[in-house]
């Protein structure tokens, strides 16, 4: 336990929440897009509390409205919006991006979090294997379509932009050859878990490459993939809102490991992949 309660160089330990970590930070004037899921509800709330305008990209608009109402009940001046986004459809991603652009808002953070996990073989709207389509291609296109807005925000505001991909430790369990570029849609050798790992590995490689290109082009945007351990320590140094977010997400994961839940999670994945 001591290991996880020990304070890091930032002065925070694993038991701190996003609220603790972002205490005193004013996010007024910042805008974030979150492709939202359950785990992140909490973080949408914390971002909104710190004054950030949060735009949630959700497939299920009823759930999105629900999160929005809950937050507004607590703070009627919070800026939260829900907009429809189905990451498994390129058309939906394009529609979301153009609707967002028509709002003429800045964009400081993009949190790519939604995902499908170890689903049976199926094809997306665009006939691509579902996990690769949702977890990787959808977010890839979204990031690409919004990157000009992010670049111009970073330029005008002199605030470094952030792209965070919620990846997974499971990226280690991809296919033997990593990403099977020529077999993405091959059903005969499809493995639900490995296909999930493959999509998450793609996220990480993508983030690394984009960060390299941003650096090369002198663009003030950092792309991070988040999975327990590595990003936490990286992000702790920044003390930013996004650091707080990632920190708490990481905390969940570490807690799971702590509690021996990792085994259970793995067996869940494996059960799902056999189902
Ligand atoms: N939970 C873990 O143990 C774990 C571990 C490591 C990494 N992760 C990663 O953490 C992230 C969140 O996972 P979670 O456990 O919170 O997942 P979750 O509860 O299963 O939620 C998945 C979310 O993604 C959304 N989604 C799925 N397909 C979508 C699509 N085509 N378009 C838009 N949204 C879509 C779902 O929307 P609906 O509500 O409409 O279904 C749901 O909100 C994922 O990227 C996951 O890979 C999770
Ligand atoms: C309420 O929301 C506003 C606008 O986002 C924010 O500036 C303020 O700090 C929030 N107040 C509380 C108590 O969370
Ligand atoms: C991950 O981040 C990069 C930006 O670094 C983005 O281009 C990419 O599409 C993101 N998402 C996925 C799911 O790969």
Image (spheres, rainbow, N blue to C red):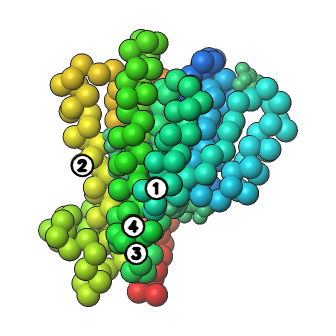
Instruction: Write down the residue under mark 4.
Output: 126
Distance, label 2 to label 3, CA atoms, is 23 Å
Rendered view: 34 above or below 185: above
Q: In the figure, is residue 189 to the left or right of 67?
A: left
Residues at marks 2 and 3 touching, judged by CB atoms closer than 8 Å: no
Mark 2 lies within 8 Å of ligand 3 (Cβ measured): yes
Question: How far from the left and from the top, in percent, is residue 171?
Answer: 31, 60
Q: In the figure, is residue 35 to the left or right of 175?
A: right
Q: If you read the primary sequence from the N terminus, does the residue marked by circle 2 or circle 3 appear first?
A: 3
Rendered view: 173 above or below 270: above
Question: How far from the left and from the top, in percent, is residue 148?
Answer: 37, 29
Image mark count: 4
Instruction: Write down the residue under mark 1.
Output: 91
Instruction: Write down the residue under mark 2.
Output: 205
Classify mark 2: helix, strand or loop: helix
Distance, label 3 to label 1, CA atoms, is 15 Å
């Amino acid at each position: 336990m001591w290991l996880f309660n020990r304070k890091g160089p930032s002065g925070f330990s694993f038991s701190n929440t996003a609220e603790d970590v972002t205490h005193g930070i004013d996010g007024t004037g910042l805008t974030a897009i979150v492709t939202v899921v359950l785990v992140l509800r909490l973080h949408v709330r914390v971002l909104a509390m710190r004054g950030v305008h949060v735009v949630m990209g959700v497939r299920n608009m009823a759930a999105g409205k629900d999160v929005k109402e809950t937050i507004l009940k607590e703070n009627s001046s919070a800026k939260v919006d829900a907009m429809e986004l189905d990451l498994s459809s390129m058309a939906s991603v394009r529609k979301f991006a153009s609707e967002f652009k028509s709002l003429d808002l800045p964009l400081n953070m993009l949190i790519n979090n939604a995902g499908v996990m170890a689903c049976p073989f199926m094809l997306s709207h665009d006939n691509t294997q579902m996990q690769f389509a949702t977890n990787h291609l959808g977010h890839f296109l979204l990031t690409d379509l919004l990157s000009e807005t992010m670049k111009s925000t970073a330029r005008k505001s002199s605030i470094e932009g952030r792209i965070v991909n919620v990846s997974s430790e499971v990226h280690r369990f991809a296919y033997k050859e990593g990403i099977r570029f020529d077999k993405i849609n091959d059903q005969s050798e499809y493995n639900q878990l490995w296909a999930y790992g493959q999509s998450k590995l793609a996220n990480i490689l993508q983030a690394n490459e984009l960060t390299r290109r941003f650096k090369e082009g002198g663009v003030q945007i950092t792309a991070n993939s988040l999975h327990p351990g590595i990003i936490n320590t990286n992000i702790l140094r920044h003390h930013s809102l996004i650091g707080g977010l990632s920190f708490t997400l990481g905390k969940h994961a570490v807690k799971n490991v702590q509690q021996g839940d990792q085994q259970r999670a793995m067996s869940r994945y494996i059960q799902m992949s056999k189902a």
